[in-house]
Amino acid sequence: MRSFYILIFTFTVNLSFSQIELIQNHDIIVSKNDINLSNAWAGGMNFCQFSNIDLNQDGIDDLFVFDRSGKNGTVNGNRIMTFIFNALTNNFEYAPEYIQFFPPLTDWVLILDYNQDFKPDIFTSSESSIALYTNTTINEISFEFTKILTSDAGFGQIPVYVSSSDIPAIIDVDGDLDIDILTFDPSGTHIYFHENKSIQMYENTDSINLVRSDNCWGRFKEDFSTNTVTLGLNEDCNEDDENGRFAHSGSTVLALDLNPLNNEGLELLLGDITYDNMIMLYNGGSNEEALMVEQDLNFPSYTNSVNLTRFPAAFHVDVDNDNLKDLIISPNGVNVSENHKNVLFYKNTGNTGNNNNIQFDFIENDFLIKEMIDVGTNATPLLYDLNNDNLLDLLVSNKGYFDNGNYNSKISLYENTGTETNPEFKFITDDFSNLSTLGNLVNIQSLHPTFGDLDNDQDIDMILGDNNGQIYYFENDGENTNNDFPTFSTYELLDIDVGSFATPQLVDLNRDGMLDLVIGERMGIDNGVYNGINYYQNTGSLNMPEFEDYTPEFPSGDYNENGDQIFTKSLGGIHLSDPTYLTGYTTPFIFEYNNIYYLAVGTESGLIYLYDNIENNIDNNLILNLLEEYNLITNNIININNCVHSKITIADINSDQKPDLIRGNASGGLELFLGSEDSAIHNIDIQQNIKIFPNPNNGIFEIKIEEKGDYYITIYSNLGKILIRQEILGSNTKIDLRGVLPGIYIVEMKKNQTLVERSKIIVMN
């Protein structure tokens, strides 16, 4: 037997992109109005929920934020954001390293301590019921799934129903020290009281044992036609007239005690999917017998009232660490409400007056958001040197800012005022070249720019895509001198239509000296063809561009109900619609690294795909072999997928000869990832519950996992080619790599889409 080893340094001489790891970073300074944004790269905020939890175990409450910018019931897009409170700056600082410790969460999340062990636990949605994760933190934060909560309504235990669009109230309702739950009934009309009998049954709070003890808690019913409630109902929620009817398809409920010394029980703050304000219901009963006697449609402020277009939700949390719980109000309706300046902070100014009533004073409508790059919905970044100073500037386009039911699309410009090795971005304008007021562009959404000199006159021209799938050509008629940004006032609508949501990129794909067009789109199926990434080759001249559709078709291997084969019309044979989403909303970005083209593609599902084998098929006549499929290196280039609508740009920001990536998302913000050379081939600290043996081996080895979970394995060659990607079934799995060349291979293990191990194996022959 001949042994064969490859040393690490032998394949770092000519690095492939697979040997670059993109590491999340938030150190590059971004300023706006001469103020540095402390959380510039936190990723924006749209439809957020807030809870307090001590993340770093320093005894100070930090902040957990859950942004439900994805679709109901899906994990991707339900973003987790974690912020550490810095006592020196009196500010919350984005700390994404804690995200990994939380389980997959959907729709709504409330974190509170149910068992009084001073470690907050997780209550979250699970298929229209409530899942409980108990906090098991010892040295670092951790959670363990406990159960799906059930309640006895007189005919046995059944799951507690909570619509995916609702948020329940979880709090000690009756004053007996254990956690109870208030939910709307399935019709969305009145409140169920699920009483926890833990104290009565066991004289402790270690468990949750629910009984539905009241079907009309508070004796009120939401009105059908107005944003009011009907008060004074009997215990069955019946009334003498017909004003109270099924009222809504979604509601948020916050229970809090505004008068803690009068023993009148909890008040309710309600948000409804149809309305822009909140209703405060005042309790004139007791802890044991709630009775709502008064409603206030302007709470918590008469001078700065809640106005979020639709579906506000309130959260009672301490956001300034003064040991008083404040009020944060944010929209809960995905894509139907404000997406900018939409986190309202009402400060708890303490107990005032002889009656000890709590008062909330309005502070701001952009809590945390003012510290971020946030452009509303669907942020699309682009790095490009717009003023010819050899520094990459940053543009951020969007689907739009939500205003009165419409999206107003703009492009923001951040000038790079740093150096080649230490970039800094300074906000210049939120309406680059005044495009939002230019002609017919006023009425379009999802502006998507790309730049290049298309007519060989030594200045920067612009191509712009829109939500209608159209492409606009802006010729630069002015002079683009140093430190002078181009402006565009006229445009030509090109004879290109890719259906919807065109995301163009200018790139010389065939290296003939002329810029071609690669265009992503919404994607889907049209006349038996999967639509994908469009390729329009520049067949004109250096001085006069002309784009011709060269998009190839490939047999997909799929068939329709009639048995006819479905084709894929896409550059590289790429079709990336996710079964969960059905559409792709692809954002392709071709970049060069070590003189080789790579293609990265952002998608609606949030995954970012990476391909090579792009230009190895160019013949001597500079013509692409378009019938060659691109090679998939990985389907998640940054190993972090906590968003939907990934939009990307890749370039060397800091001149270290390594590619960097900026990702935009549906929440309207950006995240920064810097390239780190060779880290992809270094071991991550191996989990004690995962063993790979033998190593070295002859191509056959086993993976032993001692902890249950959804594990996936990916094995790469030293050039980044994927050899195996499969689910790990059972505690022991045998892997067969016989037939590969002797050498070193990279093994990645993921659990619930989170990377838990990366290590080397040596195959001998």
Image (cartoon, rainbow, N blue to C red):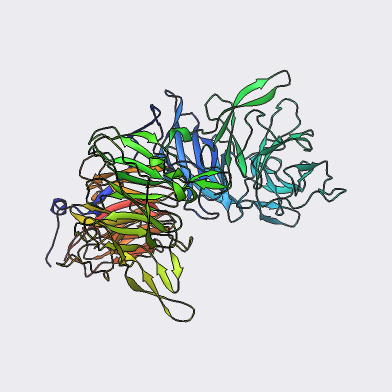
Q: Percent from the top left, x then y, of residue 716? A: 26, 59
* Direction right: furthest residue: 240
Q: Is residue 94 visible?
A: yes
Image position of 393 (left or right of 114): left
What is the quadrant of residue 425 in the picture?
Answer: top left
For image coordinates 48% across by 60% down, the residue present is: 581
Quadrant of the image containing the C terminus: bottom left
Q: Compared to 93, does 683 lie above or below? A: below
Quadrant of the image containing the N terminus: bottom left
Q: Percent from the top left, x then y, of residue 558? A: 41, 75
Q: Percent from the top left, x then y, of residue 338? A: 55, 42
Q: Nearer the viewer, residue 657 or 192?
A: 657
Q: Compared to 588, does 263 lie above or below? A: above
Q: How many marks?
A: 0
Q: Nearer the viewer, residue 607 or 194?
A: 607
Image position of 620 (left or right of 497): left
Q: Nearer the viewer, residue 30 or 186?
A: 30
Q: Percent from the top left, x then y, of residue 512? A: 19, 60
Image position of 105 (left or right of 393): right
Q: Compared to 756, does 531 lie above or below? A: below
What is the quadrant of residue 465 in the picture?
Answer: bottom left
Image position of 402 (left or right of 18): right
Q: Is residue 589 visible?
A: no
